[in-house]
Image (spheres, rainbow, N blue to C red):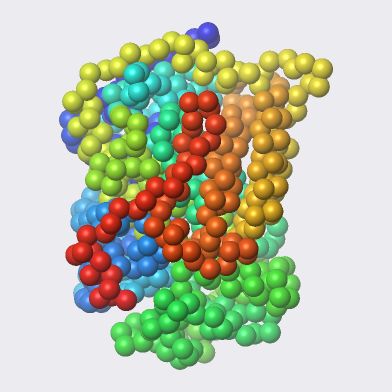
């Protein structure tokens, strides 16, 4: 096998977004040596793109808020298939994690009396999102990095993990390649934390960057871990749709939180047309009340634009399908209308939504202070992922932990905006803490060279000369997969289409075994794409199989052929794992009974 450089850490964290950085900080504080690996440069992880804010019941803007309300909102948003213990821990601990971030130097927007300012967001009963304009992720990453680099963490940038290594059932390291030079690296570790983010690149239209190819999901799967809820993919209702080169780029929910409204081509505010029963009591029934809510009137109810993302996305799709869409196939999102209500509206929009202002001005030549935006749904977030113990974040494979978007549980069938950034802080910390404990309690494992040799052989296979049919490049397969997932396993799903998708995925997987790349191993994007492709294909199969199995509509999963909820599915999570024969196995796992104390909270908040 070609040359391999070896590194040894007590805890190896894979991923340098909010979850990975927070885990690395905590593990390091636990007194163990920590390595942090990331595909791109430090500071470039997805988290940096986060806009609207971090959800935490600080109660700074409305003192009626507390962890109980946040817990109930999260469970209702997730349609009660969440891991209730994770939802509880998240709601209880998020305020402390945000205050800690502030103590480490994060500069949040302020209330007039100097406390952290909080804004309204979909599905949150009270203003709850701590934010920095619409650039919250940047501040979060900057703060965690500044804090983290003083903890003695070893950072391995532009390094992609290809396989997890096991010894007698326990994870004991990882095998990776350097993107720049193409050389292999072997990481020995007593515990590994996966914090690899999402899978958005399995779809054609997405807000996710090139890094989000479901690597952590695939690594965990091949290592034998359970994954849960993979059918629940969040399509954010508002992505840019025009010009085509920027399709999918996110338009933060903060626009609607600040008073932005959705209209169809007839100028009709269609979100008032359909309000789900579970939210009727909490939702404004007239425009005036909705406006007052966005301006902080505590007696007003939220406008229907701030209903959960799954619902808003489906209403937009309905308008488009029924011929009431905007010229480029979306709907209109208008914040400029607030000038009818506020004297200094343009300045306010620029101050509150600076990135949105620049994004539309520079990419679409639209001045959002003067005219509406055109928006449509974009693949944004995966609720499903590695199944973990709520308290420790350990997966079903000893020594393997997961946190952040690549882990499952807290969000159930649908994530509320802002709950990801707080999830990263709460569960990143927990994963780091318990991985460090695990590392202290366990001796290093044995590295089996057969596993590293096999990983290297697979990685280099695309360079091999191919037989008669010659093989094909990875890009066409990737594109076909993205088109297929978008069309057949998208926002609105039905059995026949998903069966076609599954057949298609298998055919693409077969073609992928013959993928061929040219050039050498030094920074070779074709090769990198070929390696990512295997992960995308595995993840796509998990999504399609789980979505087929869940014969009901719940949260982000909308089945045209099963448009209603089915109570029996409300009692289970769908779990996928790799069988001994290497096949994807799907099972239903009953959700444990919720303690009376938590049930009571949900009833009280209904
Ligand atoms: C535009 C946008 C705006 C958003 N706004 C908000 C918001 O306001 N509030 C909110 O709560 N959520 C928001 N989200 C969602 C939120 O940002 C993400 O869910 C979250 O940042 C994910 O963080 P993470 O730490 O799990 O992973 P990421 O930040 O995605 O980081 C993943 C890390 O893993 C690394 N990695 C991946 N694969 C490998 C591999 N094979 N080997 C080595 N390293 C690997 C990557 O290089 C990266 O460092 C937004 C998302 C987007 C796209």
Query: Considering only vertical position in the picture, is 375 above or below 441?
Result: below
Q: Quadrant of residue 299?
A: bottom left
Please report the residue visible at 26 percent of the width from the left and 38 percent of the height from the top. Answer: 432
Please report the residue visible at 34 percent of the width from the left and 37 percent of the height from the top. Answer: 395
Q: Residue 111: horizontal and vertical position, in percent?
A: 27, 73
Q: Residue 108: horizontal and vertical position, in percent?
A: 30, 62
Q: Is residue 604 visible?
A: yes
Query: Considering only vertical position in the picture, is 338 above or below 15?
Result: below
Q: Residue 553: horizontal and vertical position, in percent?
A: 53, 63
Please state which of residues 73 and 371 is positioned toward the viewer in this rendering. 73
Please state which of residues 512 and 432 is positioned toward the viewer in this rendering. 512
145 horizontally vs 366: left or right: left
126 horizontally vs 481: left or right: left
Q: Quadrant of residue 21?
A: top left
Please report the residue visible at 39 percent of the width from the left and 57 percent of the height from the top. Answer: 571
Q: Residue 512: horizontal and vertical position, in percent?
A: 67, 29
Query: Considering only vertical position in the picture, is 536 above or below 353?
Result: above
Residue placed furthest toward the front: 568
Q: Quadrant of residue 570?
A: bottom left
143 horizontally vs 349: left or right: left
> In which quadrant will I find the C terminus?
bottom left
Please state which of residues 542 and 112 is positioned toward the viewer in this rendering. 542
Please report the residue visible at 43 percent of the width from the left and 10 percent of the height from the top. Answer: 449
Q: Is residue 415 visible?
A: no
């Amino acid at each position: 096998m070609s040359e391999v450089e070896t590194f040894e850490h007590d805890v190896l964290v894979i991923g340098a977004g909010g979850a990975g950085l927070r885990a690395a900080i905590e593990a390091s504080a636990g007194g163990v040596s920590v390595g942090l690996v990331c595909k791109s440069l430090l500071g470039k992880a997805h988290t940096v793109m986060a806009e609207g804010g971090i959800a935490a019941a600080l109660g700074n803007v409305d003192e009626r808020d507390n962890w109980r309300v946040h817990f109930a909102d999260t469970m209702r948003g997730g349609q009660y298939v969440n891991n209730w213990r994770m939802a509880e821990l998240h709601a209880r601990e998020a305020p402390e994690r945000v205050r800690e971030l502030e103590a480490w130097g994060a500069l949040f927007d302020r209330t007039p009396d100097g406390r952290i300012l909080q804004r309204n967001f979909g599905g949150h009963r009270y203003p709850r999102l701590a934010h920095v304009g619409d650039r919250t992720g940047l501040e979060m990453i900057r703060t965690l990095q500044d804090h983290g680099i003083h903890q003695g963490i070893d950072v391995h940038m532009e390094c992609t993990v290809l396989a997890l290594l096991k010894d007698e059932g326990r994870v004991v390291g990882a095998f990776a390649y350097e993107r720049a030079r193409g050389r292999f690296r072997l990481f020995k570790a007593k515990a590994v934390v996966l914090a690899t983010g999402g899978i958005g690149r399995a779809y054609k239209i997405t807000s996710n960057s090139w890094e989000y190819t479901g690597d952590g999901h695939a690594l965990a799967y091949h290592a034998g871990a359970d994954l849960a809820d993979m059918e629940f993919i969040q399509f954010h209702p508002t992505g840019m749709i025009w010009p085509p080169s920027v399709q999918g780029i996110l338009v933060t929910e903060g626009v609607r939180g600040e008073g932005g409204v959705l209209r169809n081509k007839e100028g009709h505010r269609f979100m008032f047309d359909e309000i789900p029963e579970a939210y009727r009591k909490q939702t404004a029934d007239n425009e005036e009340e909705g406006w007052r809510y966005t301006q902080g009137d505590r007696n007003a109810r939220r406008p229907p634009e701030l209903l959960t993302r799954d619902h808003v996305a489906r209403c937009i799709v309905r308008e488009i399908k029924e011929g009431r869409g905007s010229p480029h196939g979306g709907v209109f999102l208008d914040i400029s209308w607030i000038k009818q209500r506020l004297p200094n509206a343009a300045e306010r929009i620029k101050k509150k939504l600076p990135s949105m202002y620049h994004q539309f001005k520079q990419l679409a030549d639209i001045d959002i202070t003067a005219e509406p935006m055109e928006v449509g749904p974009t693949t944004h977030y995966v609720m499903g992922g590695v199944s973990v113990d709520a308290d420790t974040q350990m997966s079903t494979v000893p020594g393997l932990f997961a946190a952040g978007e690549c882990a499952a549980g807290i969000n159930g069938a649908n994530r509320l905006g802002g709950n990801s950034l707080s999830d990263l802080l709460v569960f990143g910390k927990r994963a780091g803490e318990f991985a460090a404990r695990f590392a202290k309690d366990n001796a290093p494992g044995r590295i089996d060279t057969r596993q590293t040799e096999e990983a290297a052989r697979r990685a280099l296979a695309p360079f091999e000369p191919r037989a008669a049919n010659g093989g094909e490049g990875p890009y066409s397969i990737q594109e076909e997969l993205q088109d297929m997932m978008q069309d057949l396993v998208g926002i609105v799903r039905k059995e026949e289409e998903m069966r076609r998708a599954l057949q298609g995925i298998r055919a693409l997987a077969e073609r992928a075994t013959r993928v061929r790349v040219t050039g050498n191993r030094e920074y070779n994007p074709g090769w990198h794409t070929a390696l990512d492709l295997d992960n995308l294909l595995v993840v796509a199969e998990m999504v399609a199989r789980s979505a087929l199995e869940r014969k009901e509509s719940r949260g982000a999963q909308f089945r045209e052929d099963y448009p209603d909820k089915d109570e029996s599915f409300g009692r289970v999570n769908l779990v996928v794992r790799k069988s001994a024969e290497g096949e994807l196995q799907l099972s239903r796992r009953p959700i444990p009974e919720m303690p009376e104390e938590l049930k009571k909270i949900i009833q009280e908040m209904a």
